[in-house]
Amino acid sequence: MSFVSKYNRIAPIYELIDLPLELFFFRKWRKEALSNLSGKVLDVGVGTGRNLIYYPAGCRVIGIDKSEKMLRKAREKAKTMKNVTLYPMDAEQLDFPDNSFDYVVTTFVLCTIPDPVKALKEMKRVLKPSGELIALEHVHSSSPFFDLMEHLINPVLFFLLGDHTTRDTVRNIKKAGFTIKEEKSLAFRDVFRKIRAKP
């Protein structure tokens, strides 16, 4: 089953699955990372639209996702948001011209995209030279304990969500040609991180 099929299947209960993480961690990180952005923003893997309330009204936000059923949930949230447009789209083949966006945002997405380096190269292409990638992600940990935990839960999360817990996302961002400007550990030692990078 493809990761898109998995997300279409779990879309109705997706927000319940990670509700504890959302309440205790994610919403605080989203607010801190997104509430000061400006200009034109691409939200890659917008999912059910949890980021949308944190963008300033002055931002022009384009959200994309490959799962139509997840997008349906996001559209409900975006009904009254005149600055948000949502499209079904593959992150590995972005249908936007070069140098289109001031920011590209990913939140807990780079663990599920089948070819993350290909997608990141596309994100780099559509970013303006002055633009910035902002990523909130769970990544492969340098801690032996958390590394073991990630390897143990990886088969389960991959089966359920197409989620790779052992992915070296920071290395993938560099491989795609980005320059890391900030890498901040957020929780569970260095499992959850905020990464800011320039094209």
Image (tube, helix red, strand yellow):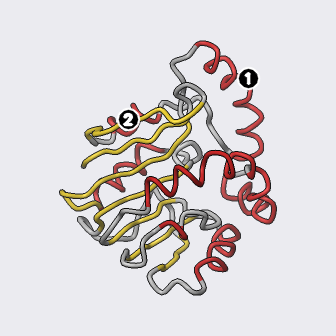
Q: Residue at x 36, y 55 (%)?
A: 122
In the displayed structure, 80 sits above or below 127; it is below
Element under label 1? helix
- Where is residue 65 shown, x and y percent of the image? 56, 65
- Where is residue 86 shown, x and y percent of the image? 52, 76
Looking at marks 1 and 2 on the same chain, the residue that comes earlier in the sequence is marked by 1
Classed neighbour count for the residue bearing mark 1: other residues with Cα under 10 Å, few (<14), some (14–19), many (≥20): few
- Asked if disc 1 and disc 2 are in contact, CB closer than 8 Å, the reply is no
The quarter holding residue 101 reads bottom left
Residue closest to the eye, 145 or 159: 145
Q: Residue furthest left?
A: 129
Which amino acid, by three-letter code, is at mark 1? Answer: Leu
- On the rendered structure, is 196 left or right of 188? left
> How much space separates mark 1 and mark 2, taking CA atoms?
25 Å
Q: Nearer the viewer, mark 1 or mark 2?
A: 2
- On the rendered structure, is 184 left or right of 157? left
Element under label 2? strand
- On the rendered structure, is 22 left or right of 11? left
Q: Which residue is mark 2?
A: 183
Q: Which residue is mark 1?
A: 152
- Where is residue 192 shown, x and y percent of the image? 54, 36
The quarter holding residue 92 reads bottom left
Q: Residue at x 72, y 58 (%)?
A: 5
Which amino acid, by three-letter code, is at mark 2? Answer: Glu
Classed neighbour count for the residue bearing mark 2: other residues with Cα under 10 Å, few (<14), some (14–19), many (≥20): some
Q: Residue at x 51, y 68 (%)?
A: 64
- Where is residue 175 shown, x and y percent of the image? 33, 35
The mark tally for this picture is: 2
Residue closest to the eye, 98 or 21: 21
Q: Residue at x 79, y 56 (%)?
A: 16
Q: Residue furthest top?
A: 144
